[in-house]
């Protein structure tokens, strides 16, 4: 590739919470992958994930506000979802309840917007955080017991799945005549691909936890329905 790819820096004076938090989420999730096979590498990944999250949370701001010239290509509409996404992965990677409180108490009202489904994309990780945190409810994590914040995320994840299923009474109308999820004309396939991924993941949670019924209004759906939707996308 001969295209110039200039480096842009985010720091305390030019923050980029979205970029830093997204990277923290990637490193935290990767640390889980390598935890059993390369504990040293896993620890290194987790160390830097924590550092990046601390930086992202302390120096809040969007990278496209710090570097307006990149907004033409990938304009970030906010960083709150990335902070929740990173904290969710860090809780899964560490078990540190500080991160759980971050997503359920300190910042839930500010960033979570758990009053309805959103679309998983490069710009919005909220749906991913909702599904990831619903895992705590599915598998009875001690942090989920009596935690109304986790209940809210689980409810929003359920609503998202119901919106995706074409036969659900609350199915989204944002799809083509052939059934493809269609949110925006630009980069249109990011949403159906992201939706398919979350649907398969949710179906796995349902199966593994022996909770195989998803209620959408008066209708009930099974993990196989979510997988069928994912395959259709």
Image (cartoon, rainbow, N blue to C red):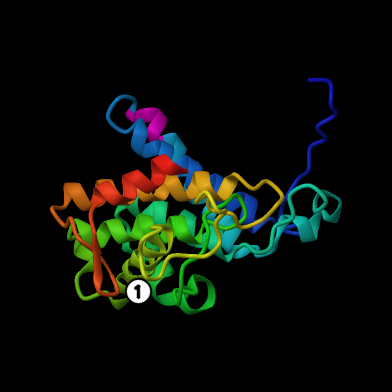
**Nearer the observer, 181 or 139:** 181
Measuring from the top left, give residue 223's x and y in whole percent. Answer: 25, 50
Magenta highlight range: 39-43
Q: Image point 53% across, 72% down: which residue? A: 111
Q: Which residue is mark 1?
A: 152
**Nearer the observer, 188 or 79:** 188
Q: Is residue 204 above or below residue 83?
A: above
Magenta-span inclusion, residue 182 = no
Query: In this rendering, would 216 be left or right of 229?
Result: left
Query: In this rendering, would 31 be left or right of 216?
Result: right
- Hey, which residue is sitting farthest left in the picture? 210
Query: In this rendering, would 3 be left or right of 215?
Result: right
Measuring from the top left, give residue 46's x and y in whole percent. Answer: 43, 42
Q: Quadrant of residue 123?
A: bottom right
Whether residue 87 is visible: no
Q: The N terminus lies in which quarter of the figure? A: top right
Q: Is residue 162 above or below residue 114?
A: above
- Hey, which residue is sitting farthest front in the picture? 177
């Amino acid at each position: 590739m001969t295209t110039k790819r200039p480096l842009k820096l985010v720091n305390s004076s030019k923050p980029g919470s979205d970029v830093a938090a997204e990277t923290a989420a990637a490193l935290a999730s990767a640390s889980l992958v390598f935890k059993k096979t390369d504990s040293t590498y896993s620890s290194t990944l987790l160390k830097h994930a924590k550092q990046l999250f601390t930086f992202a949370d302390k120096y809040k701001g969007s990278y496209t506000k710090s570097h307006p010239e990149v907004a033409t290509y990938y304009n970030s509409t906010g960083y709150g979802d990335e902070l929740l996404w990173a904290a969710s992965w860090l809780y899964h990677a560490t078990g540190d309840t500080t991160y759980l409180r971050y997503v359920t108490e300190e910042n839930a009202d500010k960033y979570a917007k758990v009053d309805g489904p959103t679309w998983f994309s490069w710009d919005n990780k909220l749906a991913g955080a909702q599904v990831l945190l619903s895992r705590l409810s599915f598998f009875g994590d001690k942090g989920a017991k009596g935690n109304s914040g986790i209940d809210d995320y689980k409810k929003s994840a359920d609503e998202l799945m119901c919106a995706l299923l074409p036969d659900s009474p609350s199915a989204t109308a944002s799809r083509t005549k052939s059934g493809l999820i269609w949110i925006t004309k630009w980069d249109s396939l990011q949403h159906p691909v992201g939706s398919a991924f979350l649907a398969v993941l949710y179906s796995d949670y349902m199966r593994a936890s022996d909770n195989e019924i998803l209620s959408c209004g008066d209708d009930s759906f099974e993990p196989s329905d979510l997988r069928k939707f994912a395959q259709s996308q």
